Image (cartoon, rainbow, N blue to C red):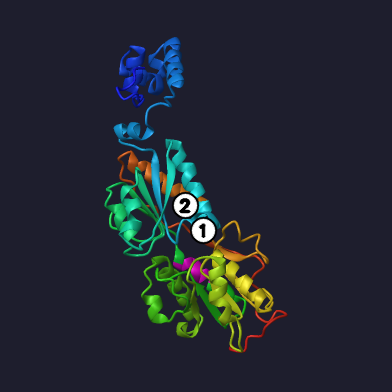
Amino acid sequence: MQKHPDGSSPRLTLLTLAQDLGISRATVSNAYNRPDQLSAALRERILARAAELGFAGPDPMARGLRRGRVGAVGVLVDEGLSRAFSDPAVVDLLDGLARELQADGLGLLLHAGRADDEAALRPIQDAAVDAWVVLSMPDGHPAVAAARTRNRPLVVLDQPVLPGVPLVGIDDAAGAAAAIAHLLALGHRRLGVLAMPLRPDRQEGPAGLARQAGATYQVMRRRLAGAASAAEAAGLSWDRVPVVESAANDPDAGARAVAGLLTGDDAPTALFACSDQLALGVLRAARAAGLRVPADLSVVGFDDSSAAPSADPPLTTVRQPLRDRGRELGVLVRALLRGETPPAPEPAPVHLVVRSSAAPVGGGGAADARG
């Protein structure tokens, strides 16, 4: 292959390889993309010369752009990318999504849904993706707006609700109501709630009615509404049920947020944590406070992630079909990429899974004096 006048070698492309071999560019392209169009001997000669010259083949990005596809689906993840690997519920969802997308040869490209400044949104605006999946983001988040400007197919898990965008949801209110009803059936009247973030401002501590009503995470609005409905149906005034907000949906933040609620004469005998990650934090905080679960404190979570049955004690929790929901996201993405207009599925049902982290009040542990 001839060198440039300055002694440098030309950039290897399909065209330069074709010129070196004395054949057409289309013939070289067929060696990589349509091998059935060539004899085995010709294809072997092309690939052997390419290897000799150090040519790895056509640029996959350029090839994808010519087809109108790049083979990747962008996933917006809240609270940073680490959540995609540390939260078992998110891991299960992504597993279901990836299994469905691989049927069409599609991969996942994860993006942190940050909103610090314009520079944080640039990777989303520049991402080479065929479609977007929004994993549970708050109302009005700039990262979601940035993804929408790309005019790619978009699917949402849980939140936010966007006009004309398919959403894969669950009956959050019914799940939370089932958790509260279970604790009430066990005789508990001193209840507490540990909530996931209500707004993306990383606030931690007691969350009054105004803070709850102003939540920009719709999932939390629905779960708190379901919990309040069940409590009030049993004659408990919701404004007397302490709700504590965690700054993040992880065990460390949950343990820190709930620690102050677990001490004192009026401490709850039962606590509903709005995710299994937070429930694990409650178990940790209870041990630190010298409380036995469930003898002194009953705990119910939400998700039934893979961490729930192996917790100590195993978590009573609200089960949602995590992998199935991930697959449903993938089904919608694949349909949208085929040019179809699929209807959004009905919210998936949830149900309570009873294990050993909740027990009747006073069963060898704390007495409930409120009545």
| Dot 2 crowding, Cα within 10 Å, few <14, some 14–19, many 20+ | many
Element type at marker 2? helix
Say if 189 sits above or below 155 in the image: below
Q: Is residue 175 rendered magenta in the image?
A: yes
Q: Which residue sits furthest front?
A: 6
Residue 223: quadrant of the picture: bottom left
Q: Which residues are magenta?
A: 173-179
**Amino acid at the residue labelled 2:** Arg
Q: Main secondary structure of the magenta part?
A: helix
For label 1, the crowd category at 10 Å Cα-Cα, with few meaning under 14, some 14 to 19 and many 20 or more, is many
Q: Residue 336: x, y in percent?
A: 33, 43
The Cα–Cα distance between marks 1 and 2, rounded to whole angstroms, is: 8 Å
Q: Which mark is residue 29?
A: none
| Percent of width and height locating residue 105 | 43, 36
Tag 2 residue: 325
- Which residue bears the numbered disc 1? 320
Which residue does the image show at 50% across and 57% down from the upper left?
82
Residue at the spot 42% in from the left edge and 69% down from the top edge: 222
